[in-house]
Amino acid sequence: MNILYVTFAVVILDQITKIVVKGISIPFLGITLSGMEYGQSYNVFGDFFKITFVENPGMAFGIDVSDTSKLFLSLFSLVASIGIGSTQNFDLRLRMPSSTSTYSSQTVSVTVQATTP
């Protein structure tokens, strides 16, 4: 289950980074963030780690597809991710013990009787 928390944290961090780089405007809340200029770099850890604003107009590996294809592939990816996640969750439930808690304590008692001849 910890991997789900790590995955969730990475996705949230990715989305926050995208908002900071590209900017956002929500007029009815009065939120406006200008973002970075195209090609601008921001040093996070000196020259070792930089955030640079570049864009890939296509999908993975620069494949040039239409907007309809992008929507279809994005929806397919979402459905596939949900399907994989639900099968993993189902598999985890099959492996769990039937008690309500994940870790149940079990007591084993051993009785030793000594008899004298």
Image: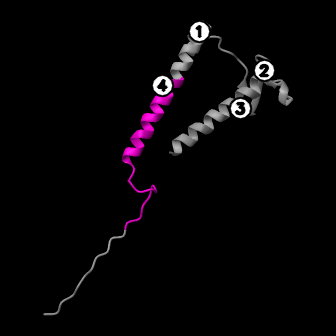
**On screen, residue 30 above or below 115:** above
- The magenta segment is 78-106
Q: Which residue is tagged 1?
A: 68
Distance (Cα) linking label 1 and label 4:
18 Å
Please identify the quadrant where the C terminus is shown: bottom left
Confirm whether the magenta stretch covers residue 93.
yes
Dot 3: within a 10 Å radius of its alpha carbon, few (fewer than 14), some, or many (20 or more) residues?
few
Q: Which residue is tagged 4?
A: 80
Q: What's under tag 4, amino acid-wise?
A: Ala
Q: Nearer the viewer, mark 1 or mark 2?
A: 1
Distance (Cα) linking label 3 and label 2:
17 Å
Q: Which residue is tagged 3?
A: 16
Report helix, strand or loop for mark 4: helix
Q: What's under tag 3, amino acid-wise?
A: Ile
Q: Is residue 8 left or right of residue 100?
A: right
Q: Are marks 1 and 4 in contact (CB under 8 Å)?
A: no
Distance (Cα) linking label 2 and label 4:
35 Å
